[in-house]
Amino acid sequence: MRYSTLHTHTIFSDGKHMPEDNVLSAIAKNMVSIGFSDHSYTDFKLDCCIKPVTTPAYIAEIRRLQKKYADQIEIYLGMEYDGFSTVENRELYDYILGDAHYLKIGDEYCTVDDSKATQLEHIHKHFSGNAMAYAKAYFETYVDSVQRLKPEILGHFDLLTKFNVFDESAPTYQKAALDALTTSLKVSPLIEMNTGAMSRKAKDSPYPAPFLLKEILNQGGHIILNSDSHDLNHLDFYFDESIEILRSVGYKHIVQLIGGKFVEVGI
């Protein structure tokens, strides 16, 4: 099948390549569409986000590429919004991804996906070593982000598992995750299967975990396959294998953005 990805990062935030280079790679891979979703501005952490001064250039560049390559591939303009970002004008974008990269504890913004050492430090410092309390706080933050942003797509739902710190089989963990999932799907029933941590060799399986994939299906949610690519070589990373995982769970369709609409595509 022809693939699509709507979670792509460029040099406008923390990606390695220009948007046009990503487009050319997507065309070479015979992808049906590509969407750009650089990280929105966060004033407390500047090394990985788009800056307000460059946002107009980002928007103009993606719109320019849409026109230039209209006869070869569909190109969409998005933005990845964290729960602590402010959506300035969502009418500027074709869609937004909503997720959570930080926990705010007091005046400190604790990055969820920086490194295993940092995550363990925060668990020790702010949760007295209680990993499950950290997990509950993460999922509460995720829900708050989704309810405020109302994104078209739910991004990397269980990002906190990137470094294999948590026992995902524990009833306490699964209850926190499933409660958050249920609430989030009521806001947006479209959730991504994200292979980004795999391409960066941080995980050996996509987000979300299999028990969450089953519950998404049970609740009538929909999966969109995204690579969360920061490198043009990874635009369709692990997509064939991800389709097989979805089939094994019982999915018959994924969703792609085609012709300006989110549509079901058989797998």
Image (tube, grey):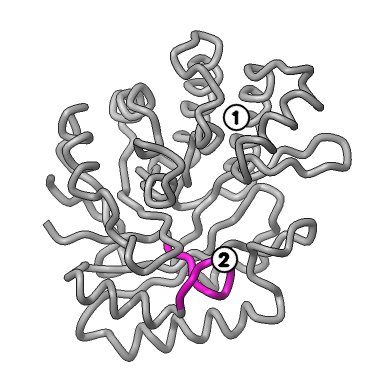
Please provide the residue range marked out in magenta.
8-17
Assign a secondary structure to mark 1: helix
Residue that carries the numbered disc 1 in the rendered image = 139
* Residue 180 drawn above or below residue 96: above
Disc 2 crowd, CA 10 A, few/some/many (<14, 14-19, 20+): some
Q: Name the kind of residue labelled 1 in the image.
A: Phe
Question: Is 142 or 196 nearer to us in this picture?
Answer: 196
Residue that carries the numbered disc 2 in the rendered image = 14
* Residue 90 drawn above or below residue 146: below
Horizontal side, residue 154 vs residue 193: left or right? right
Assign a secondary structure to mark 2: loop
Q: Residue at x 65, y 37 (%)?
A: 144
Q: Residue at x 54, y 50 (%)?
A: 98
Q: Name the kind of residue labelled 2 in the image.
A: Asp
**Numbered label tally:** 2
Magenta stretch, overall SS: loop
The x, y position of residue 32, in whole percent, is 21, 68
Q: Residue 207 appears in which quarter of the rendering?
A: top left
Q: Residue at x 54, y 74 (%)?
A: 11
Disc 1 crowd, CA 10 A, few/some/many (<14, 14-19, 20+): many
Which quadrant of the rendered structure holds the C terminus? top left
The x, y position of residue 46, in whole percent, is 73, 64
The x, y position of residue 200, in whole percent, is 43, 51
- Of callouts 2 and 1, which one flags the residue occurring earlier in the amino acid sequence? 2
Q: Which mark is residue 48?
A: none
Q: Residue 258 appears in which quarter of the rendering?
A: bottom left
Q: Residue at x 27, y 72 (%)?
A: 26
Q: Is residue 12 magenta?
A: yes
- Do the numbered discs 2 and 1 sit on residues whose CB atoms are within 8 Å? no
Cα–Cα span, label 2 and label 1: 24 Å
Q: Is residue 181 magenta?
A: no
Question: Is 21 or 4 nearer to us in this picture?
Answer: 21
